[in-house]
Image (cartoon, grey):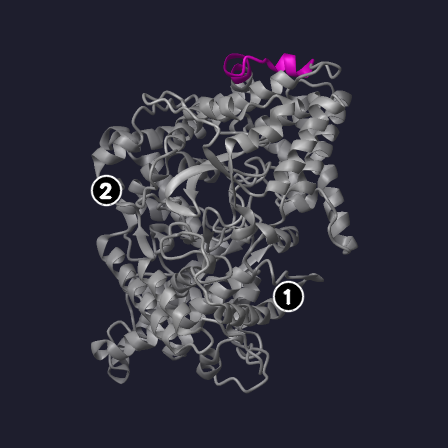
Amino acid sequence: MNGYRHFDNEFDSNIRNSAAILHEIEIDEPYQFEVNPQLTTYSAKSNKFKIFFLRRTLLERCLFFLTIILLIIIIIYFLHNKKNFKNSICLTPSCIQVSYEIYSGMNQSIDPCEDFHQFVCGDWIKKTIIPKGHYIWSITQELTQKNMILLKNLLEQTSISSVINAEQQTIQYYRSCMNITELERLHIEPLEKIFQYNLNFTLKQWINLDKNQTWQQLFIYLIKIFSTQYGFSNIFPIEIDSDEKNSTWNNIHFDQPELNLVSRDYYINLTTNNQTNQRNQIIRETYSKVGSDILQLLGFEKNDSIRRINDIIQFETELAIINLPMEILQKPQETYYLMTLKQFQEQYQSIGFDIYSFLNDILNINTLNPIKLNENDTIIILSYEHMLQLSKILTNYLITQNKSHIIIDHMLFSFVYNKVLHLSSIFEKALLPLKKEIFGIDSILERWEYCIRQTDDAFGYGLGALYTRAVFDEASRLKANELVKNIRLSFEENLNNLQWIDEQSKNEAKKKLEKINEKIGYPDFIKNQTKLNERYAGYSMIENEYFYNTIKVINREHKRKIFKYRQKVDPTAWRMTPRTVNAYYSPPSNEIVFPAGILQPPLFHKDLPLAINYGAIGTIIGHEITHGFDNQGRQFDGDGNMRSWWTNISLNNFQDRTKCFMKQYSNFTIDGQHENGQRTLGENIADNGGIKISYFAYQKHKQSTLNSDNDFCLPGLNYNNDQLFFISFAHTWCNIQTLNSIHHDLINDPHSPPPFRIIGTVQNSDEFSKAFSCRSKTTMNPSNKCQLW
């Protein structure tokens, strides 16, 4: 779904982008990470070390040995002087690893009070190169990569006979994806069979589609078959999800049409910035060329493919014009419209679209309890006005101007466009010019990386079972739970001291805070072999049939989701898989979720000093809690229902204070382009609230812990623990990315660019300025500071 409806996550800005363009989301997948099995407390066998070592260049091997020598010297030095340090230095493998990572990335010649981003990340930025197939690299991406290498070894070395069925299916799916020889041999044969046997409409029929005929009935047929079999309908995307005003029950949501480019802004020039407009024009032209190339690979004649893709782009442009922009999608009250099926049917009767037949076909897939809809049943749409505008466009194409062939081309091309990465490599190569223009990607992602991401999409819990068994124990889960508990308590104590919010609103906020549900590491069922097998019951993956395996998974997962209709919302369900390096807050569920993937060094480890844990994962925990009270989350109560629980005076004070953040962040620029402080407001509120309440929780933990348990220093870092807290926070957001992807994020990502997540947050922190003794009116200690939570 668009907007907030699914969740506010810590990194990911493109939840439902085109699979053809974003087969991997770079953040979280734009920002992720993972465990280095050679250097952390997670021991690895010698063959893993060899794999790691042989991947390195000669220079990297020399640097590796120099690093080991440096660490040995550090250990000897501190052991020799341990009496002077009263056992305050942490010398566990995880501490040594994290200390080196932080130290080697810092540029200590920079004044932290003038540029804290460069102070913490300067040397890391200088020496880091974006790997092949990526457009962004970061500390969290490094963690993701370590996790990926671990998963690669597990998927390739685990014996099928040694694991349960769910894990067998996971491994077989990955191996089918890696069977490149078979993919190349089959070429487009799997797609041809899908057209012929599933759509009952061959590729040849599509190529020879007569533009002078009326294809209204084919439009209705394709809408139904795509929606029932594949959960795919870019004209009427539907989702079964919680009703925002009755959050314990699921209902049908109609989203706005999906576009093949990842942003509506690429279709229309909405800015006076000529550079941005020119860039958008180049992206559209590249999309036209790539789309034409794909059609030619399917057998279309060149001139015909050019004409048809340009017609498709014109149709998509009309859809883009009426689609709601992100600034509106971020306003829950303005994107919730409950209507009856009768009301919906009245608007689409003229094009022959029968909403009752359409939904009944979708909802009654292989069910023993048939559902019969009536005219008084309700659905949820984003906007009544948008629905009217879409109806006019469809009527114009299907009836008034008899351009129904263009809609058919759009639907079939969009279906193919989102499936071509499951075919031979020639299609991936065809897509590369468009990826380069949008993201600056100039090479194809390593096949094994792509296949692990696909496996996580298809069998995320099977993969999660393998992953958590290898790297995430119960002690880590308990430690993470303790951090969440302490930071939640810190939020409440800070709330009590706020003067701008009155007692009535404050009490409502406390009720909501108390009801926040927390999920740590993984869903419990993945540790139960019977339940995990039940989750994937009926799946049968064949190692030489990757395309068909993917279609089977899509079909079964679609059916599983459809069965949620008229059912209560499952409070135990997760929206992220365990290996994911990310976190999220969901307003309709009022829950915070932290998968095992993000609970790894350098963000978290049960043996790391308190300052590191609270500075890194602690600020992320605080970030997600604060999302419950940002400009979107504040519109939901403790039960996840969208309702107003604020007094007028408190709401006015809230809005006045948020203006400060919008002004501050809108002044940040990259390559001459300003950040949109309104678009990033929710994330900036969460960043600022997160660091504040995590710091307070850290201070309280220090004071309450006997002998300052775990409040160690790191070897080689000549900073006190208050300073290490902020250094650890900033280290989390060290990143580099291509200029094209920066421009993409500035118009699409609700998060501030990582440098501004660091700078903007510490500029508002009195505690930071005190820790580093920053003089008044230095860059990091301005006289005007934005404060909310």
**Image coordinates for residue 48, horizontal then vertical, percent:** 34, 46
Is residue 36 among what the camera can see?
no
Query: Percent from the top left, x then y, of residue 555?
Result: 43, 25
How many residues crowd around disc 2 within 10 Å: few (fewer than 14), some, or many (20 or more)? Answer: some
Q: Magenta includes 87?
A: no
Specify start and end residues of the magenta stretch as a single range: 193-208
Point out the frontmost of discs 1 and 2: 1
Residue type at tag 1: Ser
Where does residue 361 sit, x and y in percent of width and height?
46, 21
Asked which secondary structure carries label 1, the reply is helix
Identify which residue, 267 or 509, lies in the foreground.
509
Badge 2 marks a residue whose secondary structure is: helix
Return the disc, 1 or 2, that comes first in the chain's sequence. Answer: 2
Tally of numbered discs: 2
Q: Residue at x 52, y 48 (%)?
A: 26
**Vertical position of residue 605 compared to residue 44: above or below:** below
Is residue 420 shown above or below 337? Answer: above
Residue 306 in view in this figure: yes
Residue 201 within the magenta-colored segment of the rendering:
yes
The residue lying toward the viewer, choosing from 523 and 644, is: 644
What residue would you read off at disc 2?
527
Position of residue 353 in the picture relative to residue 706 (left or right): right
Q: Which of the 4 quarters of the picture holds residue 117? A: bottom right
Relative to 484, residue 786 above or below: below
Residue assigned mark 1 = 666
Which secondary structure type mostly characterizes the magenta part of the structure?
A: helix
- Report the disc number at residue 440: none
For the residue marked with disc 2, what is the amino acid? Lys
The local crowd at label 1, few if under 14, some if 14 to 19, many if 20 or more residues have their Cα within 10 Å, is: some
